[in-house]
Amino acid sequence: MGRAPCCDKAKVKKGPWSPEEDATLKAYIEQNGTGGNWIALPQKIGLKRCGKSCRLRWLNYLRPNIKHGGFSEEEDNIICSLYISIGSRWSIIAAQLPGRTDNDIKNYWNTRLKKKLLGKQRKEQAAAAKRASLKPQILKTESDHSLMVPGGGMIMNNQTQYYWPELPAVIMPPGGGLVNQTQLDPNFKDQESLKNFLIKLQGGRFSDYHHQLSNTTTATANNVQYPFDVSFSQDQEQLYDSTITTMLASPPTSMNSMNSSTTASRLQDTHEYNIIGANMIINQGLENYPVEPSHDDHLIYNNNHQQRLDIINGVESFYGMDQMVNNNGSTGTTSTSAESNSWEDISSLVYPNSMLKEEVNNLDSNGTGSAAINGEEIVGIASGLGSIGCCEKNIGTPPINQDIHTPPKWIVNEANETSMTASSDPFESIVKSGPILGFVEKEPIDNISSSFSFLNSPSLTNGLDIHANQVEEGVGLIELENWGSLKKNQ
DNA sequence: AACGATGGCAACCGCCCCGGC
DNA sequence: CGCCGGGGCGGTTGCCATCGT
């Protein structure tokens, strides 16, 4: 016995809404609200529509501040990041995008974004096949725990702790316990490969997180721990509902609002880096990945696209998707041509340890601030509103990203490496000690803008941008020995 | 120019959750 | 505690515009 329909289907109008119907509905709701009863509403106002249809029309089209079309790159990134983490929970994703409806995002994903990424996937697969044919040798990572790292976590490296600023959300079913991917999204099927691909780019897989968590209490045997804070903030609860637990990297206190999309793993030797934060690729702009394979595979490090492809390749290697892992456990970052660069090539381009400090913190409702510091030089600063500047030492330099703030002039307090001040900006910084792993992308020409979503952040605008300019060519993982926070000067 | 294919998107369908009774 | 019904949500459909042949 089925449920009684919410309305008499024979008496209600279906199909597109007329301007008159729109006007009637809009005028009534704006004046009286919905009255908490959508079913009764159409009768009240004389519309021959199903209450649900009225609700849908209002929510998806008529209510104020609805945006249609014209998704920005940032919105793309957010959608991708969230899709990776929580799947097709469109309403949750929509909650992170002001003015967007779940329906809109769903349509956008299904009709455009997915194809965009599938195009990228095709290219990546082709590149992987090409690499496999070119470089058959390979090995194995040096220890299993390295495989536990992607997706975020902290490794105890003797006395040194490393934090990942990025830890994607993990879905938990009601009552607790992690779910596997099938449970997570039983209808994936054809989308599963895409999602896996995205997750791979993100730097982890749900199964990996699952594995990580299940090993949290025993990981110390491998000298590995995971500083996941699985508690909810109120905002997080509102955001994700009770079925979702967000895993947070939690370097002391003020970092706890951070859940960006940087992924890194690290070997025991502090001079050996294991993997590059591949999620960066996604967040650096999908437009870098044409739907159709381009013809630039032969280019090596001459543009962002190739660099990012190489990051992907490195990640793929890491996950054993191909077999490009070298002897010392470093992940092979490979290229796609006969001139291919091995990871060893790339590692020479990696910043030395201790050269970069990163500041990240949730500022306030205006967004999240972050700064990348190279020695005494702040090489990048950003807020959730966008990047606000990219400065060389003691010099206010042009902003990377337009029109957000006047670029601040940052002056490093050279007397004390662990403190610094902003000379002319609404922000001041507080640097705290404690190693943190992060990564910097280096390239010779343009500034870099890598935008990250803060999945657990209550604010839609939150994000971490790390910028670096005037640095060596290449892409590498860096060690952040100090991290800190920014706050607004009062 | 005509027609079929494809894409984009608004709207619908039906299941599920949850609060009220 | 169980039932009922409204609301919410994700998946799907169908219409229309555009594109390609």
Image: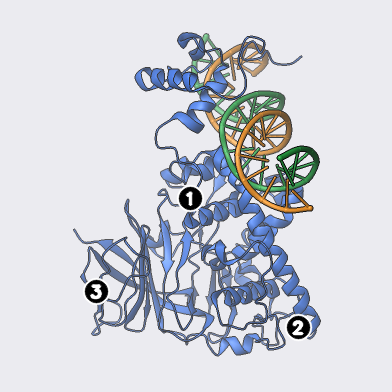
Chain colours: A blue, B green, C orange
Q: Which residue is mark 3?
A: A409
Question: How many neighbours does mark 1 have within 10 angstroms: few (below 14), some (14-19), or many (20 or more)?
Answer: few
Q: CA distance from mark 3 to mark 2?
A: 47 Å
Q: Position of residue B3 (x, y in %)?
A: 79, 38
As displayed, is residue A205 above or below residue B3? Answer: below
Residue A41 located left or right of residue A430? right
- Residues A269 and A426: in front is A426
What mark, if any, has residue A231 been given in the picture?
1
Q: Quadrant of the N terminus of chain A?
A: top right
Q: Do the CB atoms of the residues marked 3 and 2 lie less than 8 Å apart?
A: no
Q: Which residue is mark 2?
A: A139
Among the two numbered marks 1 and 3 on one chain, the one whose residue lies closer to the N terminus: 1
Q: CA distance from mark 1 to mark 3?
A: 37 Å
Q: Chain of mark 3?
A: A
Describe the element under mark 2 as helix, strand or loop: loop
Q: What residue is at 56 percent from the left and 16 percent from the top? A: A49
Q: Position of residue A238 (x, y in %)?
A: 46, 40
Name the kind of residue labelled 1 in the image: Ser
Residue A98 located left or right of residue A240? left
Name the kind of residue labelled 2 in the image: Leu
Q: Chain of mark 1?
A: A
Q: Do the CB atoms of the residues marked 1 and 2 lie less than 8 Å apart?
A: no
Q: CA distance from mark 1 to mark 2?
A: 39 Å
Q: Quadrant of residue A387?
A: bottom left
Q: Quadrant of the C terminus of chain A?
A: bottom left
Describe the element under mark 1 as helix, strand or loop: loop
Q: Position of residue A345 (x, y in %)?
A: 61, 89
Among the two numbered marks 3 and 2 on one chain, the one whose residue lies closer to the N terminus: 2
Foreground: disc 3 or disc 2? 3
Q: What residue is at 48 percent from the left and 85 percent from the top? A: A351
Q: Chain of mark 2?
A: A
